[in-house]
Amino acid sequence: IHMADKFDVIVIGAGPGGYVAAIRAAQLGMKVACVEKWVNKSGKTVHGGTCLNVGCIPSKALLETSHKFVEARDDYDDLGIHASDVQIDIEKMMARKDKTVANLTGGISALFKANGVTALEGTGKLLPGKKVEVTDHDGNSATHEAENVVIASGSVPVEIPPAPLTEGLIVDSSGALEFQEVPRRLGVIGAGVIGLELGSVWSRLGSEVTVLEALDSFLPVVDEQIAKETKKLLGKQGLDIRMGARVTGTDIKDNEVVVKYTDSSGEQEQTFDKLIVCVGRRPYTQNLLADGTGVELDERGFIQVDDTCQTNAPGVFAIGDVVRGPMLAHKGSEEGMMVADIIHGEKAQMNYDAIPSVIYTAPEVAWVGMSEQQAKKEGFEVKSGVFPFSASGRAMANNATEGMAKVVTDASTDRILGVHIIGQHAGELIAQGVIAMEFGSSAEDLALTCFAHPTLSEAVHEAALAVEGHAIHMA
Ligand code: FAD
């Protein structure tokens, strides 16, 4: 073992948490290294973590292709476009997805170079005294010293004993991004965000999709009105979503997967060509912490941190999926910015009440802040305004009238507590709710703001007007 350079900051993990922290710290003039162990199929170290390699980006590439395919096949006729005999080329779809991923991961490596971040290749382990041991892929290690360490080691899919991963048949979300042909019958365990997105991709391309969800309530974190509409619309698209369905076992027979589950009517069995397990993700801390670092884990395996992402060990921070809070790329990135600023000596903090969530189905589902039910539970007297896209001129022109926008407020102050949207481009529209909440806006503030016409954004405006019962384009 040889002692290498001393850094101001060493970041462990180059996902959207870690790479943002590293770049920001370097921009602030600090000497920064970032350790990453992920290697691609050709054995090259790649930056970007789960999000770029097997998460946000590849899933959105497949969602976009499959959505356009269905639109051309099913909806273009309504628009007066005769696109007969629309064909999907899976190989080309996958190649574009892979190219998008390669461009973006390469882009992060380029940003590291441009900002002077030292990219250390291999597995990082935190030793006591803010030292980081990096073991490369040939087993050689070097120990680096740092004033500050940022852990951003991310998360991995949860596996369940009744459905052990089986090459090409029972796969996790990463496997579901790599199918080389459309499975005829596809099972999905888990009706969460990832299960619904991946189920949608393959359903659009022709799979008969059954989603088995153990819980009785669908998308429990989403506003009930929006969740109900989501379930209805996804059902209409052909996703067979079964609630209260607990998977108890799986058998592989003749290259098929037989899934056993129990629901309210007893024991059930169903055969699939492929099965995706999407039951959640868990924090990843394997071989990460040597004895005596002082960094502690909570009872669920997350690294214990305070509101500013500081661990129990002075000078050691942790951000992203490996700490509490929603497992979202932009949440990790914001924490990365905050931590870099704090290390630089600034008083930084972040607003955990205004983190948006998006489900990239069609229509998209997006929300920020509290649902109506959650606000009531928290003791607020709630007043809500809803505006359906069926009353929006732009939605009609777009042939996309499904869904609604909803603004939830505190009745006593008119302050916005949450914004919930299901509809075309909901993931873009939600930013308006995020900005409003970040500025402590009232519904009246939004109602008095001028929105461009004709846009889908007007639905947010109208929902804010509807809080007082006065939407213009709704009786
Ligand atoms: P990660 O992205 O998991 O990165 C951690 C990195 O650390 C990895 O590269 C890993 O190799 C590296 N690492 C771990 N341990 C070590 C070590 N000891 N030494 C060196 N390197 C190490 N989120 C969204 O916001 N929007 C979406 O649309 C979205 N879609 C998703 C779709 C799918 C299919 C999946 C699986 C996830 C999706 N997510 C989405 C979640 C998102 O990917 C994560 O929230 C995000 O990647 C977390 O970022 P992170 O930096 O904390 O960790």
Image (spheres, rainbow, N blue to C red):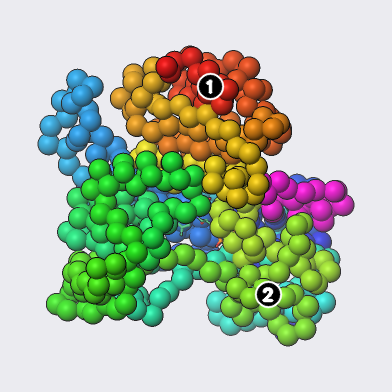
Q: Quadrant of residue 284?
A: bottom right
Quadrant of the snapshot with the N terminus: bottom right
Q: Is residue 44 above or below residue 444?
A: below
x 55%, y 80%: residue: 138
Disc 2 marks a residue whose amino acid type is Leu
Element at label 2: loop
Q: CA distance from mark 2 to mark 1?
A: 48 Å
Among the two numbered marks 2 and 1 on one chain, the one whose residue lies closer to the N terminus: 2
Q: Nearer the viewer, mark 2 or mark 1?
A: 1
Depth check: give the residue in front, 208 or 57. Answer: 208
Q: Is residue 437 left or right of residue 279?
A: right
x 20%, y 69%: residue: 270
Disc 1: which residue: 469
Q: Position of residue 316 (x, y in %)?
A: 77, 67
Q: Position of residue 149 (x, y in %)?
A: 75, 66
For the record, the magenta segment spans: 335-353
x 60%, y 20%: residue: 447
Q: Are marks 2 and 1 in contact (CB under 8 Å)?
A: no
Q: Is residue 95 above or below residue 118?
A: above
Quadrant of the snapshot with the C terminus: top left
Depth check: give the residue in front, 436 or 7. Answer: 436
